[in-house]
Image (cartoon, rainbow, N blue to C red):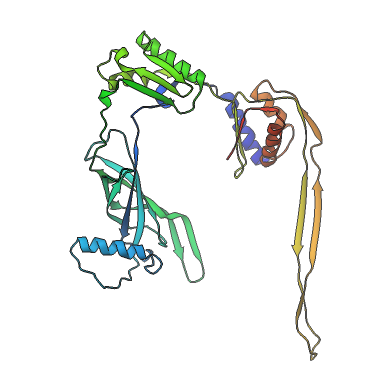
Amino acid sequence: MRMLASAILLMLMAAQVTASPIRIRDLVEFDGVRGNDLIGYGLVVGLNGTGDGIRNAPFTEEIMTNILERLGVNVSGEQFRPQNVAAVFVTASLPPFSRAGSQIDITVSAIGDADSLLGGTLVMTPLTAADGEIYAVAQGTVIAGGASAEGDGARVVQGVPTAGVVPSGARIEREVEFDFSALRDIRLALRTPDFTTAARIEGAINAEFGRRVAVMLDSGTVTLDVAATRSASPAHALSRVENLFVEPEIRARVVVDQRSGTIVMGEDVRISRVAIAQGNLTLRIEERPIAVQPNPFAEGETVIVPRTDVDLVEEPGTGLAEISGGTSLSEVVAGLNALGVSPRDMIDILNSIQAAGALHAEFIVR
């Protein structure tokens, strides 16, 4: 009942939330204003015996040898058996218009058999983009998001100690070459394409400038003529555009999470008149093997005799219940709640209603 109450509460909360004006900057992506992904391969040192096993991760020995040789230490032919180093992948996102010298956050993830990165320090690691060029260099103390402990007979792991972050752990060394001020037309790409929302964005921009400066190309694109805005630069034009408010059109959706039993419905969800019958069938199988031994001083051996208990139970269902066509979300919720089933059974019912063509909304299962 608690899970059912939680699911119904989420649906009622969705019923009370109506579409409100949203800033254009929160609805679109501006052409040219984007980040770039960076990746690197490095070494974390200073671990308390929780690093890679060299025999199981030979690439750790290779990168450690390369680093030491670059520092002038000759290790040719030497055998390494440390447990305080771990090979890692380093990832980051280069924000748009980042300048050389600024710092960004990085994520560090073990790729070998290290048990934990707690207390480790990332050694200087170059970060490259898709073009193969180095854009940043990372180094710093790793903050891992978990903990682990083990003894002779048990081990406890909380969170993910083999991954962590280094706040402001990378310094930008190269800037992305892009002349934003030379743009004559800027495309606004809607994060959720919709013709109605795109038309409203076009109307809001044209109303702000008092003339036709924006044109809707399709459901996901609105183009802005920078010259027609008579602004000093594209940056000045976007500073006026991004803070305009538009009421987005929200599609009717039903989103369910089968793992947690969560159900969320949009305001515009509608259900046609249907009749539903629901019941549960439970099958329980229990094995109880019996050991049969020979009589004392008799020749023979112990035999395991299988014993199986099978129990088939059919729980009473809700019968054939009718749900009238809902004209509002509150009526839809009231009709589904009248079935008196758990959220997980509600997911199956909604899926069946959608298959029958009576659910007039996009059905998304996560």
Residue ID at (47%, 56%): 158
Foreground residue among 134 and 263: 134
> What x and y, as percent, mark residue 49?
36, 66
Relative to 106, is 322 above or below?
A: above
- Quadrant (top left, top right, bottom left, bottom right) of the N terminus: top right
Relative to 137, is 295 above or below?
A: below
Q: Count the labels in the image.
A: 0
Residue ID at (26%, 23%): 182
Q: Residue furthest bottom?
A: 297
Relative to 237, is 297 above or below?
A: below
Q: Residue furthest left?
A: 72
Quarter of the image where one finds residue 45? bottom left
Q: Is residue 143 visible?
A: yes
- Left or right: 286 as drawn, with respect to 244: right
Foreground residue among 16 and 111: 111
> What x and y, as percent, mark residue 33?
34, 30
Q: Is residue 48 visible?
A: no
- Left or right: 274 as drawn, with respect to 147: right
- Left or right: 151 as drawn, with respect to 88: right
- Left or right: 361 as drawn, with respect to 83: right
> What x and y, as percent, mark residue 298?
80, 90
